[in-house]
Image (cartoon, rainbow, N blue to C red):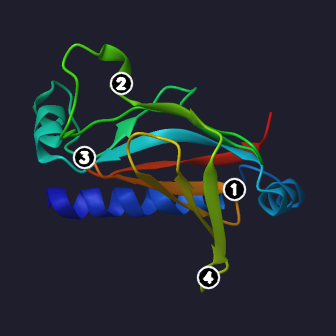
Amino acid sequence: MKAFILMIGFALMTMSCGSQIYLDPVTLNSSIENKEFDFNATRAFPTNYDVINVLNSMPGSTSTRLLNLDPGYGFNLKKDLFSVALPYFGRAFNVNPGDATKGGLTFESKEFSVKQSTSKKGNTLFVITPTDQRENYIFSLEIFKNGSAFLSVQSNNRQPISFDGNISAAK
């Protein structure tokens, strides 16, 4: 019964999010064509079950695999700069224990490649690969027609993590 209620709640939440317009279509298309926009992360979806178990053990937990994020997390894509400021929840395989500044995904890249394609449903897909970083990252971003977006981050040194958010015009 609990699972049924969660499924209905998730379906209603998804429907309400799908009808919300985050960015007007003209500005969205212009930002996508120019490949200059900001991704604003609103939720994180960790894949590490240790993190999920800790989240579920907290008082008032909703037994979900998502974390609501404060404003300010995301990335900025411009022609000559890819600036990332995202939190990370999961397992990193090679770390420097005393270096507290490397906890999240925070870096700026001036050498990166951007591949753009379109899905069968008409959503825009971006694959952004920075080449001047110590870790090999692959950022896969799917932008929906209403301006919402889903980001998946893969690395050679960390477990994958996904983010939900929206697109805004580059600042």
Q: What residue lies at 81% left-to-right and 54% top-to-bottom?
A: 31
Q: Secondary structure at mark 3?
A: loop
Left or right: 101 in relation to 55: right
For disc 4, the marked residue is 121
- Residue 167 in picture, x, y percent from top left: 68, 48
Marker disc for residue 102: 2
Q: Secondary structure at mark 1?
A: loop
- Residue 53 in picture, x, y percent from top left: 10, 39
Locate the N terminus by quadrant.
bottom left
For disc 1, the marked residue is 147
> Identity of the amino acid at label 2?
Lys
- Foreground label between 2 and 1: 2
Q: Nearer the viewer, residue 51 or 15?
A: 51
Residue furthest to the bottom: 120
Q: What residue lies at 89% left-to-right and 60% top-to-bottom?
A: 26
Q: Earlier in the sequence, mark 2 or mark 4?
A: 2
> Identity of the amino acid at label 3?
Thr
Marker disc for residue 64: 3
